[in-house]
Amino acid sequence: MNIVITGANRGLGLGFVQYYLAQGDEVWACYRSNLDGLDDIQSDKLHTLQLDVSRDFDANTLALPDSIDLLINNAGIYGPYGAQDLDSITSDAMLEVFNVDCVGPLRVVQQLKERIIRAKGTIANISSKMGSSYDNGSGGTYAYRAAKAGLVIISKSMAIDLKPSGVSVITLHPGWVSTDMTHQSGLIDVQTSVAGMTDVITHVGDYELGQFVAFDSKVIPF
Ligand SMILES: NC(=O)c1ccc[n+]([C@@H]2O[C@H](COP(=O)([O-])OP(=O)(O)OC[C@H]3O[C@@H](n4cnc5c(N)ncnc54)[C@H](OP(=O)(O)O)[C@@H]3O)[C@@H](O)[C@H]2O)c1
């Protein structure tokens, strides 16, 4: 399979790269500014390319395959730590996180969709349970919650819009994972999360259109 992963230089993105290379797939690993963990991987199936999802880009200027079986929109930011409550959240922080976490995946899909359609491929959008209004029992975290909720909504529209072209779209929640984003304070490690999410991706046909699914296969109401 030809697989494109955004935010692939560390954390869950790097975990996806390692998983799919071990399966023998060709992986196009996108990084924003530094190769980080990608630099340590020796594989002729690994292709690295610079891609900042916060900016418009033209896929024709990138060294991408003509046909993409799987796109994982993984790149994301949390926004300011400890400054996302009702009193401290700023409009700049709201817009920055929304741009990366919600508009970013939309940009990537708009640019890559013809290649994904060619393969009748799959798009996995990595959101977060924090983007579920149903699950919000503690309030706060305005920027991250809103951006990830927006991603759930656009992911559902993509699922509907791309179904006639044979493309499957799923929204994923990785669990609470030990990465830089959680200051390594997660309940599970990257390998466990990636093993679960890749299993959901493999069985994407078993889920309803645009469903929001956690790494442990549980469907998340939103
Ligand atoms: N960890 C968790 O518990 C958890 C839970 C729910 C959802 N998620 C979601 O899972 C995804 C991966 O999270 P993680 O825990 O692996 O986080 P992480 O360790 O902080 O990694 C985030 C990745 O996104 C990249 N990125 C950030 N802004 C970008 C941009 N503008 N363009 C391209 N790449 C960009 C980062 O690149 P740089 O190194 O260049 O900054 C990095 O590769 C995110 O979407 C996150 O919201 C994580």
Image (cartoon, helix red, strand yellow):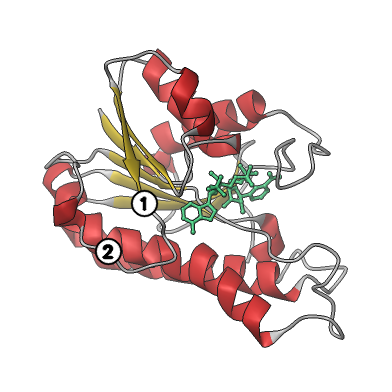
Q: Are marks 1 and 2 in contact (CB under 8 Å)?
A: yes
- Between 151 and 212, the residue placed more toward the observer is 151
Which residue is depicted at the point 76% across and 63% down?
135
Q: Secondary structure at mark 2?
A: loop
Specify the label residue 136 is tagged with: none
- Between 123 and 163, the residue placed more toward the observer is 123
Q: At label 1, which amino acid type do we have?
A: Leu
Which residue is depicted at the point 23% across and 61% down?
111
| Residue 184: x %, y % from top left | 79, 36
Q: At label 2, which amino acid type do we have?
A: Phe
Q: Which residue was labeled with disc 1?
A: 51
Q: Is residue 58 left or right of residue 56?
A: left
- Between 149 and 161, the residue placed more toward the observer is 149
Specify the label residue 57 is tagged with: 2
Q: Secondary structure at mark 1?
A: loop
- Label 1 beta carbon within 8 A of ligand 1: yes
Which residue is depicted at the point 27% across and 16% down?
44
In primary-sequence order, the first of circles 1 and 2 is 1
| Residue 93: x %, y % from top left | 66, 76
Residue 132 visible in the current orientation: no
